[in-house]
Image: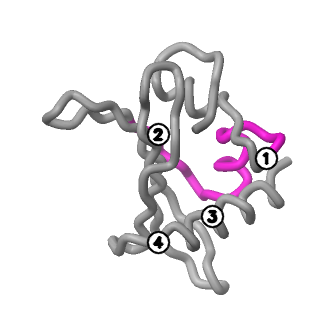
Amino acid sequence: MFISCGSGNIDLVKYGTMDLCEFTVGEMVDSYFSNPKWEEIVSDDNRSYVNITGVLRLSDEPVVATLQFKIRDDRFMVNALEVDGEGQNELIILDLLNSMCEEAF
């Protein structure tokens, strides 16, 4: 889980940090995604999520990716990653997050 001190769920994620990186999630996203779009959604069972969708390069190919964070109280955690509509496993998610941290400014 990760902690933030922003207001609203998008700000919670955008200005929050993760244990694996000194940069905020927003800085990581801005340095890795082209034209990222941030969206808060609430599921039918009243759970909140923040989705970040944009274009990134994997193996030198542009792909559309959606990185999803689950919100729980004032904390958030990575919930899912889709690349060109296909769900990715936890290892791929961790690799992406590490790469995003390395590219952050």
Please name the amino acid that badge 3 sits on: Leu
Q: Are marks 3 and 2 in contact (CB under 8 Å)?
A: no
Across and down, in percent, residue 72 comes to 42, 28
In this view, the mark in front (1 or 2) = 1
Q: Is residue 84 above or below residue 11?
A: below
* Residue depicted at 52% across the width and 42% down the height: 77
Q: Residue at x 33, y 71 (%)?
A: 85
Q: Earlier in the sequence, mark 4 or mark 3?
A: 4
Please tell me which of labels 4 and 2 falls first in the chain: 2
Which amino acid type is marked by label 4?
A: Asn
Residue at mark 4: 89
**Contact flag, marks 1 and 2 (Cβ < 8 Å):** no
Q: Which residues are magenta?
A: 21-39
User: Pointer 2: residues within 10 angstroms few (<14), some, or many (20+)?
Assistant: some
Q: Secondary structure at mark 1?
A: strand
User: Which residue, given by chain and number where applicable, does mark 3 sit on?
Assistant: 94
Q: Residue furthest front?
A: 1
Query: Which quadrant of the structure image shows residue 91?
Result: bottom right
Q: Quadrant of residue 23?
A: top right
Q: Are marks 4 and 2 in contact (CB under 8 Å)?
A: no
Q: Which mark is residue 38?
A: 2
Mark number displayed over residue 21: 1
- Residue beneath the point at 61% across and 79% down: 58
Q: Hey, what amino acid is under mark 2?
A: Trp
Q: Residues within 10 Å of mark 3 (few under 14, many from 20)?
A: few
Type of amino acid under label 1: Cys
Crowding near the residue tagged with mark 1, few <14, some 14–19, many ≥20 C-alpha atoms within 10 Å: some
Could you tell whether 98 is left or right of 29 in the image?
Answer: right
Distance between the Cα atoms at labels 1 and 3? 12 Å
